[in-house]
Amino acid sequence: MWPNISTAPFLLTGFPGLEAAHHWISIPFFAVYVSVLLGNGTLLYLIKDDHSLHEPMYYFLAMLAGTDLMVTLTTMPTVMGVLWMNHREISHRACFLQAYFIHSLSIVESGVLLAMVYDRFITICTPLRYNSILTNSWVMKTGLGVLMRGFLSLVPPIMPLYWFPYCRSHVLSHAFCFHQDVMKLACADITFNRVYPVILVALTFFLDDLIILFSYILILKMVMGITSGEEQAKALDTCVSHISCVLVFYITVIGLTFIHRFGKHAPRVVRITMSYVYFLFPPFMNPIIYSIKTKHIQRSILRIFSAHSRA
């Protein structure tokens, strides 16, 4: 038996040393959360309402927006609870469930970005076969596969958290539950929980990133073979939004990984801030990127505004 095993709730942490400023810090956080909800919610509404957006590319964009909404709704209650009311306690089950959704949805987002590059690849490299390859059935199966990969792959490391004994400090380093944070508090052999995530990251984020990079090399090679400069620019323009979202997502993933692995001497507030950037920046930027760079979505937004102005 382990000594001093406790079932006391975990304690979330905001910004250590800046507790007095939490109310002020909550203002930009709340503004970003509201922007994320409005931006991604608007994208989902536009794709559902506008029949011209009922295409594979926009179905995947809807999945991306839905994933970003779920990530936001998963972290928002505890983050704002800590910043607004200093409500730090979270039960073990709620904490493990939050960690499960946070990490699962990150893998889902990576999978959606991978599916989207396949859409761009078919559009540019084999446009005549686009409708026969990217059928509604294929989109549904791919979407289901992406969801299953994300949610099933996190079961093995999260389940042991439920039966681990916890006899160390119950203080977590963020205002939400990270698997890495929680497992360090366990008084048990956590070798599997240390090794499995490394393998999982290699087989998901790293592999997805390599496939996306390779796909764009093939796309670029195909585009460079087009004789017309105007057609080249038009083909590349269809990829700009997706490339931007990929860069936003993977740069934040790499940044967070480097900070946690090699930034042990960096100020704690920097490590904490980077974790918030990882969860908030991609969901905040994705709707903006697609609204600015996608003409179909721009027209759909203008159509809604003109309809409301006439009303």
Image (cartoon, rainbow, N blue to C red):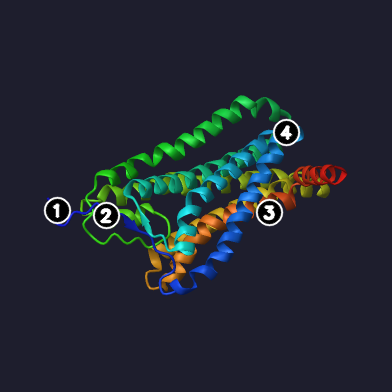
Sort mark 2 into few (<14), some (14-19) or many (20+) by Cα contacts within 10 Å: few
Q: Residue at x 27, y 47 (%)?
A: 192
Disc sitting over residue 127 in the figure: 4
Q: Is residue 247 visible?
A: no
The answer to which image quadrant residue 310 occupies is: top right
**Residue 167 in picture, x, y percent from top left:** 21, 57
* Among numbered discs 3 and 1, the one appearing first in the sequence: 1
Sort mark 1 into few (<14), some (14-19) or many (20+) by Cα contacts within 10 Å: few
* Among numbered discs 4 and 3, the one appearing first in the sequence: 4
- In the rendered image, which residue does mark 1 sit on? 2
Q: Nearer the viewer, mark 2 or mark 4?
A: 2
Cα gap from disc 4 to disc 3, whole angstroms: 27 Å
- In the rendered image, which residue does mark 2 sit on? 8
Q: Is residue 132 visible?
A: yes
75 on left or right of 228: left
Q: Amino acid at mark 2?
A: Ala
